[in-house]
Image (cartoon, grey):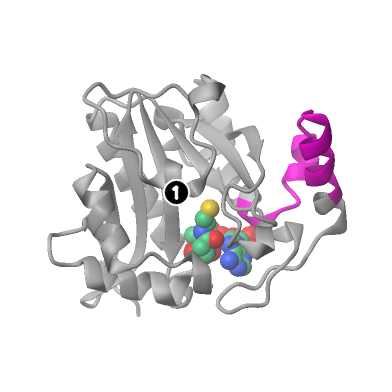
Amino acid sequence: MLHTPTVRVLRAGEEADLAQLEMEAWPGPLQASIDKIKTRIELGHRIMVAERAGALIASVCYVPTAHDPFEWPAFPKTFEAFSLMPRSQAVRFVYVYNLCVHPAHRDGSVVRALMRAGILDSISLGAESLVADGRCPAYAGSTELPDRVDADEEFHQAIDDWRMSGIKPSDEKLLRDPVLRFYRRLLGCRFLYLIPDFIPADIASGGHRVMFIADLKKATLTNDRDRNAL
Ligand SMILES: CC(C)(COP(=O)(O)OP(=O)(O)OC[C@H]1O[C@@H](n2cnc3c(N)ncnc32)[C@H](O)[C@@H]1OP(=O)(O)O)[C@@H](O)C(=O)NCCC(=O)NCCS
């Protein structure tokens, strides 16, 4: 039987362990190097990890910020800018990125425990909402291990239409993608923006990201009915 994971903040000196987890959880170009992880920590980012039998098995990064995601002109338009924002003193939001679970531990339970800890930590820092960059690998599909996502023609068309017209597609269309569906189920999030060329190395997503927002207090609840009752 698998032991319940321990969830905690990444400790100093564990950057190489996290880089190893990223190597195993992400397809090639999306993995963070040790230096990148160190830079994020120096900028004041938090990294929550799950550990099982002495090994890191899941992680998520976030930066506490006063930056309002609805101020579109100032919103970071690339993953580089989004994931290298300095932490602000006053905190209203957390900007979240690089959520991953080791492929051998993907059953939903680890990621829920990890996100719950990250959310409670963010609330304790003063944040009200989280903003994150949603991958959308159904755009082009991926067979590069450990990714295994089928391309979805209807989803692809919906993203292309959004990019051309600026009009957000229906949730029904967006939820054809497994990662966006996963985030909706986990957090009850609302999709905000499409950013083309946010991360060109993510070929499966066509470089796009679908940015979303979720209320942190509602996101700790386990199902949509409880969230809607708030
Ligand atoms: C996204 C992720 C954290 C989910 O963790 P998990 O333990 O598998 O979570 P769950 O079991 O609750 O959810 C699984 C769902 O995620 C989907 N999924 C998300 N990313 C996937 C991927 N890279 N490959 C295959 N399926 C993926 C599954 O299809 C499934 O959706 P469905 O049940 O609606 O078909 C994990 O799949 C992962 O680490 N993926 C790679 C990194 C990544 O893409 N992170 C998201 C960054 S925006």
In the image, residue 125 above or below residue 185: above
Q: Is residue 214 visible?
A: yes
Q: Amino acid at mark 1?
A: Glu
Residue 200 falls in image quadrant: bottom right
Residue 158 falls inside the magenta stretch: yes
Query: Which of the 4 image quarters holds residue 119?
Result: top left
| Element on which disc 1 rests | helix
Q: Report x, y in % for residue 229.
A: 54, 22
Left/right of residue 216 with respect to residue 146 in the rendered view: left
Query: Could you tell me residue 126's position as x and y percent?
Result: 26, 25
Residue 123, compared with residue 50, is above or below; it is above
Asked if residue 107 can be seen in this view, the reply is no
Name the residue rendered at 23%, 58% in the picture: 38
Residue 193 percent across, percent down from the top left: 64, 33
Who is closer to the viewer here, 18 or 87?
87
Q: Which residue is mark 1?
A: 80
Range drawn in magenta: 157-179
Nearest to the observer: residue 61 or residue 120: 61
- In the image, ligand 1 is in what quadrant? bottom right
Q: Position of residue 114 (x, y in %)?
A: 35, 54
Mark 1: few, some, or many residues within 10 Å (few <14, many ≥20)?
Answer: few
Name the dominant secondary structure of the magenta segment: helix
Residue at horizontal 23 percent and vertical 78 percent from the top: 53
The residue sitting at 23% across, 30% down in the picture is 125
Residue 166 lies in the magenta stretch: yes
Left or right of 109 on screen, residue 203: right
In the rendered image, which quarter contains the N terminus? bottom left
- Does 6 appear above or below 81? below
